């Protein structure tokens, strides 16, 4: 069989092919254009080559090690690679495609899912290394972020800094790991209960893998960045209220719900980011719950949807946690 290489492959690339190519080709007779490259990308990573190899039936799963081209331009490359290699080895992802968003604590990437997952793309949230360091300037972080114990109970006031373990690097890393685990467990519980959250797939170390909402290069926008059609307003509000109530029934309060943690895609909403979630059975959670409800109500005000957030929150709370609405709203 004689085949021509894809158009954009040059003589140089041809010489870089495996020793024993799957097919023979005719040399392409044209001048080799030498473009100055900072660092030559690996032959296997060329998109065109990958497609070509696939067509030839070359088993791409035989790739020896996880080495996404995308990472070559990333400052945090070694950290990201070590965080995501277990997901590659467990045949959950095959490539990292792009950054979705880099936040204070974590970066979210869009990954190509392994065919065995039955999914096309996955989002992975990777917590930053600084979260795991013994932080000298950690005070702000510690005071701003809700502290909780292994059961997810909020730890208040001076208790935050009590105990020698809390001040050590290992103690700090352990707490961070338990938050990440708690975030994943929460997402899984909510997903199983039918709340509209991205399907959680795996949690390995500092990475949480889940269903990706959007298309490659275009992750679903946040609710705050879209303009809803008039006929979407009421159904989406109802869906969010139902999700909030179902979460409460599942013993979870989001704790940081707003249009900044809700994705909008194809006329639907998906709640994300459970890093601040708490168990409503522990004390002082109602104000947090009421704030979640209030922020969602506030967002919908711009579309002319007016609701009494306190009343709504109190009604939901009493339905699931007991007590009386009149006692809650003073
Ligand atoms: N499953 C997903 N599919 C598509 N995009 C996602 C997904 N999960 C998160 N994102 C994107 O990544 C961003 C950050 O995710 P998330 O809110 O969980 O992290 P964060 O650390 O709280 O970041 P931030 O401080 O920016 O809120 C989101 O605002 C959203 O744009
Ligand atoms: Mg967020």
Image (spheres, grey):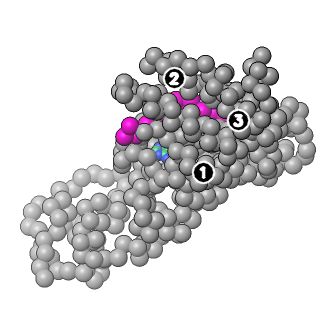
172 relative to 219 in the view: left or right: right
* Residue 225 inside the magenta-drawn segment: no
Residue named by callout 2: 299
Magenta-highlighted residues = 255-267
Q: Position of residue 38 (x, y in %)?
A: 35, 51
Q: Secondary structure at mark 1?
A: helix
Q: CA distance from mark 2 to mark 1?
A: 25 Å
Kindly identify the residue that appears in the image at 54 percent across and 69 percent down.
90
* Disc on the earlier residue, 1 or 3: 1
Disc 3 designates what residue?
A: 319
Of circles 3 and 2, the one toward us is 3
What x and y, as percent, mark residue 290?
A: 68, 27
Characterize the local packing of mark 3: few (<14), some (14-19) or many (20 or more) Cα atoms within 10 angstroms: some
Residue at the right extreme, as displayed: 163
| Of residues 93 and 135, the one drawn nearer to the viewer in this rendering | 93
In the foreground, 127 or 231 = 231
């Amino acid at each position: 069989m004689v085949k021509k290489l894809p158009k954009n492959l040059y003589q140089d690339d041809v010489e870089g092919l495996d020793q024993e190519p799957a097919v023979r080709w005719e040399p392409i007779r044209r001048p080799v254009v030498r473009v100055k490259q900072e660092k030559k990308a690996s032959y296997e990573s060329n998109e065109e080559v990958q497609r070509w190899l696939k067509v030839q039936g070359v088993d791409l799963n035989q790739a020896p090690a996880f080495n996404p081209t995308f990472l070559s331009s990333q400052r945090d490359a070694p950290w990201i690679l070590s965080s995501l290699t277990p997901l590659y080895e467990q045949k959950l992802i095959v490539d990292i495609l792009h950054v979705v968003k880099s936040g204070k604590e974590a970066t979210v990437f869009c990954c190509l899912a392994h065919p065995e997952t039955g999914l096309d793309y996955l989002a992975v949230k990777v917590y930053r290394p600084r979260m795991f360091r013994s932080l000298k300037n950690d005070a702000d972080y510690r005071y701003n972020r809700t502290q909780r114990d292994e059961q997810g109970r909020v730890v208040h006031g001076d208790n935050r800094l009590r105990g020698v373990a809390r001040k050590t690097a290992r103690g700090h890393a352990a707490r961070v790991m338990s938050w990440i685990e708690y975030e994943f467990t929460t997402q899984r519980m909510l997903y199983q209960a039918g709340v509209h959250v991205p399907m959680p797939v795996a949690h390995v170390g500092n990475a949480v893998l889940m269903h990706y909402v959007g298309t490659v290069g275009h992750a679903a926008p946040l609710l705050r960045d879209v303009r809803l059609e008039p006929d979407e307003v009421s159904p989406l509000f109802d869906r969010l209220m139902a999700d909030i109530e179902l979460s409460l029934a599942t013993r979870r309060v989001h704790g940081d719900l707003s249009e900044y943690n809700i994705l909008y895609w194809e006329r639907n909403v998906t709640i994300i980011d459970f890093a601040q979630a708490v168990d409503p059975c522990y004390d002082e959670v109602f104000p947090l719950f009421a704030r979640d409800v209030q922020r969602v109500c506030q967002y919908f005000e711009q579309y002319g949807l007016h609701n009494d957030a306190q009343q709504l929150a109190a009604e939901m709370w009493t339905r699931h946690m007991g007590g009386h609405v009149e006692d809650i709203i003073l």
